[in-house]
Amino acid sequence: MSLAATSRSLAARGPAGQLRSRAEEAASVLPPLLVQAQQLAGAVLLGDHGRRRSGVGDDFWQYRPVQQGDSRRMIDHRRSARGDQQFVREREWHIAQTVHLWVDQGQSMRFASDPGLPQKIERARLLALAAAVLMVRGGERVGLTGGVLPPRRGNAQILRIAEHFTTDETAAYAPPEHRGLIPHARALFISDFLGPFEELEIALTKAADRGLRGVLLQVLDPSEELFPFAGRTRFESMTADVRHETLKASALRDRYLDRLAERRDALNALCRAAGWTLGLHHCGDSAQSGLLWLYHALERRP
Amino acid sequence: MTLIAGIGFTSPWLLLGLLVLPLLWLLLRAIPPAPKRQPFPAVTLLLGLRDDESLSDRTPWWLLLLRMLAVAAAIIGLSGPVLNPAQDYGGRGPLLIVLDSSWAGAPRWDQNRTQIEAELSEAGRAGRPVALLRLTAPEPLQFLSAPQWTRQLAGMPPHPWTPGPAQLAQAQTMIAATEGGFDTLWLSDGLAMEGRADLVAALSDHGEIEVYESATPTLGLLPATYDDGAIVLRAQRSTSGLPQDITVQAVGPDPAGVERALAAATLAFDANSTHAEGRLTLPMELRARISRFEILNSRSAGAVSLTDDRLRRREVALISAQSSNEGLALLSPLHYLRQALIPSTELLEGALTDLLPANPDVVILADVARLAPDQEAALVDWVEQGGLLLRFAGPRLAASDTARDTEEPLMPVRLRIGGRSIGGAMSWGEPKSLAPFAEGTPFYGLEIPDEVTIGSQVMAQPDPELANRVVAELNDGTPLVTRKALGQGQVILFHVTANAEWSTLPLSGLFVEMLERLAISSVAKPPEAEDLDGTTWQATAVLDGFGRLVDADSLAGVAGPELIAGAAGPELQPGLYTSGKRAYARNVLRDGDELLPARWPASVPVQLYEAAKERPLAGALIGLALLLMAVDVVAALLVSGLWSPARVAGLALACALGLILGVAPQSGQAQSTRTATDLTANLTLAFVKTGQADADRIAEEGLRGLGNVLSLRTSVEPAAPYGVDLETDELSFFPFLYWPVTDAQPMPSSDAYARLNDYLRTGGMILFDTRDADLAQAGATSSAARRLQQLALPLDIPPLEPMPADHVLTRAFYLLQDFPGRFPRGQIWVEAAPPDAEQVEGLPFRNLNDGVTPVVIGGNDWAAAWAVDADNVPLYPVGRGFSGERQRELARRFGVNLLMHVLTGNYKSDQVHVPALLDRLGQ
């Protein structure tokens, strides 16, 4: 049963039926998203995350003689039994980064100009989740902004993120969520950034104030980049509350593209000011390229 | 009615509405279609952008034109246009409508009736009194108001005869008896009749005459005759001019007693000919069942030709006591009978026991004195059922003691010993001649030639009943032919021989005529009027004007000569007549009748029906307007983007595809059909088409894979597999059928089942595969298994059992313990071993049944395990890893074993005899 049909028949079923069908709906979305994200993440080779010094970690770093203050428990008996001196086994210090994810779940993202293309929101979720998979594999802590999901490590976190990605927001253009950010962490915001610019400005300023560095990824549909319309047309936002009617759409093309470039310039300026990186991804391109760009952008040292 | 350019308008003022069209053009042009809706999240960037050109969007010109046309069509349609409007003749005063009302008008009766009704309503509007005169049944003229006639019109169907001189004279007097003037409207059927000019003259004394006549020729069918083994059909038409083909159907009861067309012949009229002839050759049995011939699609009594027993050749069994002797053909008692009967009957010769089951119409015993008691009983039975037994005397009968003391059932009279001989070398007296036939006997009216003399006869014992039983006698009063009724049949005895030994009767034409009169031979040529002198015929069924047979209730009997020579009329209606045992079909047209077109005096205007047909155009125009509006809706939706071109194109494509697919299957089938030669040139593995595409595909791939395996490993090299359609394909080409059972399988027809049963009986094998061994045991619970039960119910399947471990399938080529397909271990059912199968000492298996099991039933989905693609790579997964490949290999081995079992039978079982053979060799 398609999702639309499911939600349509919800009212007819009663509370238990609704719960069940919602659970099914959620379950029907989750596995493919996860699998896709895992597959996508598997294509990227992970680099070495060691910090080249001893500390808390899993990997062996060095044996050193026991010093004053070391607990006896820390003595490595296997090494010590070879001679008279007692050794302590030190491990490499692994530091974990904290990464905040925010994916625009607004209605404006639920758009695809062609049935063959994925909706923007699907691509955005896929990229975010794949990035999360990569980061979890690298030992980082990943979470969602807004305090809905505090950063944690481990594969279970991926499932939780994926679960949160199954819910849509009703707002036409969702404002970026800047609450619940841990200072000096990293952040990844994915959206089409077509909503009000001021809210993005506020969010990014707040984040920069807390010392966060991160990446903005703008996901656009090809039609939003090309504007292939002509004739008498009424353009509507996805919730149909913003409208613009024109008699000759083809005449608007150049001016629209100008405005789009303006918007991108503004984004760029904002990013430079806050020390963030701006990326662009089209739904018509492969998700792989988007993920690779994300990976490198996130790996870059602040 | 106003006429504009040959088209009449009932309300021409509405046409002024066309003036509004230019205004409408301007209005519609200013109102553009609704804009396209386009969801677009980046609309926020568009806000505030203005269109620089202030051009207002216009409706496309073609859409405007479409709408204009629609409105114009509606306006013109509403103004009531009529093509070929009828002219008003503006007659006044009373109106007489004269109808020929004969069978020739029956095919056009509906048309005529509409015309009459139209004229009546016209007259009703004008307040003219109307009288109706039917020439086939004239009645005194009554001038009534038109609606009264309209009501009566339904009860005035055409009659099955044409107006004869008697009726025309009657009509003349009735017209003469009418006072005052009236106009005449004559609806003619287009056939000539004598006295038409007189009638026209009488009518024109009273007023104007106007004639309607149809231009299409009237078709008539002459009585069918039998000539040279074929039925000769002759048809006529009233006017020539164009070549014309008509189809004549022979109608009669089929074996189930339902009336249907038994055969058909096409008769072709040449352009300048009014006659057509055709021949129809039919087997005797079929010919006997024909009850009438009719011209297809011509609904009239003249287009029907009823048949009587002239077409039906009676079956006569000839039996004589003598064994046939070639040298003495002229002395054979049967020779003259044979000569007399061959032209008009089917002769059966042989032993009585062989002939009686064929139920002949007549049995002739020539000089047979005694029959075996059981034969006699059978013959009595047959006569009592309505048979006619004709016996001839002869030396044997005269010498025997048949019917001496008591009357026998198969002999009309008792006989005296020895008979008598008169006028021979050793006797006094002259040979006797025949006395004239008495009235009331079947021979009454036959002329007796002088040369017929009787030399010898057997004599009847004087008896009180004798006088009643004599049909013909000699001029000395001794009986020559006697007859008695027995049950529903009769027994007739000729007191002379059937050859020329005792009399010269068999040499004369009288002999043949007597046989005809006794209804022994049916006459090949129609009887002449004189032949029926003194007979009265009663109608059993008569034709109505449309050529349908209706019961002849209480019609008076008709004298024989009148029946043949008289013209059809109210007293002599065409139909079936009977007299005694004989039947005669009186048809509308007789041999020699001619259909001639009517000739009218030059003063009378003749109109054709066709020319005067009004054709209102309003419906068509308003329909066109509606159609244009529907197109406009689609076009408007298209223009406003509410209906995307892609979707319209998709819809159109789907429609087109549907059309193509609806037509295509036949051509597709024609392509894939392989001829019988292809199928039998090599061994062909076949599967039954299930009606489910994927199951058929898997079956085909599976059999291809199995074929490859067989070619590689054995000397069996099958051709490409073939999908068998149970309804159409011949099954006997295939030794083996694979039948995947699906829910979608339609039940085969009873024909198909008959062929399947034949197939199973004659050594074919069907492998039923329910393909669900993972879910259910075969024959247990699954839906496919239930379907299999339904499918197999009408099949002739022997008792089954799960395959025993020592079945020959386990060792026909490979040694196998189980028979996996895609599923490893479903149960397999085969024909049960005979209950007396015994374990042979020293061998691991029993002495099992001979022959090949006709069915193997399982659910292991073997085809999927066998299936390979064109590169011989397995298509479907079987099991896991190496064990899966092993399972596939075992499935292939099962296939090989199965085919070996099908092709070689069970010779592997013959090893049970090995100990005995070895034993014998040792000695």
Image: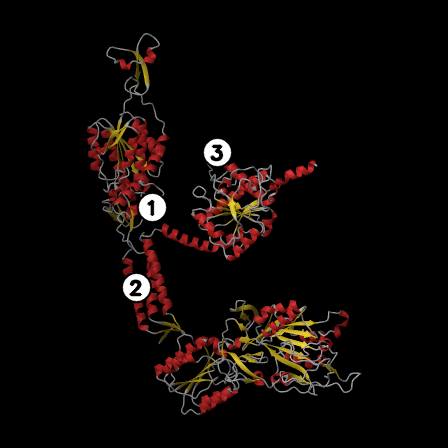
Q: What residue type is labelled 1?
A: Met
Letter of the chain that mark 3 sits on in the rendering = B
Q: Mark 2 points at which residue?
A: B22
Nearer-the-camera pick, A243 or A81: A81
Residue sitting farthest toward the right: B425
Check whether the beta carbons of the residues at disc 3 and disc 1 lie within 8 A of each other.
no
Residue B883 marker: 3
- The residue under label 3 is which amino acid type? Ser
Tell me if residue B50 can be seen.
Answer: no
Most foreground residue, B286 or A191: B286
Name the mark on residue A1. Answer: 1
- Label 2 sits on what residue type? Pro
Q: Which residue lies furthest to the front in this view?
A: B405
Q: What element carries label 2?
A: helix
Whole-percent x, y for residue B385 in the image: 58, 73
Which residue is at a point 69% across and 73% down the rendered structure image? B370
Label 2 and label 3: CA atoms lie apart by 85 Å
Mark 2 burial class by Cα count in 10 Å: few <14, some 14-19, many 20+:
few
Q: Distance between the residues labelled 1 and 2?
A: 54 Å
Label 3 residue SS: helix
| Label 1 residue SS | loop
- Number of marks in picture: 3
Q: Is B611 left, or right, of A55 in this rendering? A: right
